[in-house]
Image: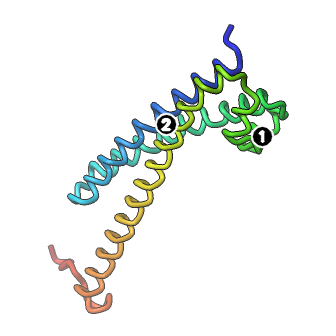
Amino acid sequence: MKTNVEQLEEVIRTEDELAQALLEVLEQQQHSLVHVQTGSVAETSAKAREFTKLIETLEKERWALMSEITGQSPSDAVQGFRSDVNAAELLRHLDAADAVRIKPIIDHFRSTAEQVVRLNETNRRLLEQARHFVRETLRVMTDNYTQQVIDQKM
């Protein structure tokens, strides 16, 4: 049976792999947004939601394991979805060999997560700009929404 530390290492590695996959999906989404490929935007948005749900599940498991390793109540971490344990505190509770092995994994995951956040924010801004463009175009084409754009006789 795996120790809590081994389970935590596995969870963080899996989270990182999923976050990297999410990053690729967000890059595809950005390409779709820039090139106005609406079908692809919808597809990548659905994929991103799937990855996010998987990551959230693993995140809960990670917080519970971190809480157990550091002596916090795991039920508090899972119930609250977060715990007060951060990576530095976790590493202080590990023996030296485990800490040396897990720190690069945590650092890589943190870096990947930061990239996901940045790219997600960029995509959000692109979507906002697209929405603004559509609204302004419709406003201009309809003379401030007073004229019809499509002939109803068609």
Residue drawn at point x = 83 percent, y = 34 percent: 72
Question: Residue 97's spot in the image, x, y percent?
Answer: 64, 19
Question: Residue 57's spot in the image, x, y percent?
Answer: 61, 34
Q: Label 1, on which residue?
A: 79
Q: Label 2, on which residue?
A: 108
Q: Residue furthest top?
A: 1
Q: Residue furthest front?
A: 96
Q: Is residue 129 above or below residue 3?
A: below
User: How has the structure been colored for display?
Assistant: rainbow
Q: Is residue 8 above or below residue 118?
A: above
Quarter assignment of residue 140: bottom left
Label ID, residue 55: none
Residue drawn at point x = 64 percent, y = 25 percent: 8
Q: Amino acid at mark 2?
A: His
Quarter assignment of residue 127: bottom left
Element carrying mark 2 = helix
**Relative to the observer, which residue lies in front, 68 or 138?**
68
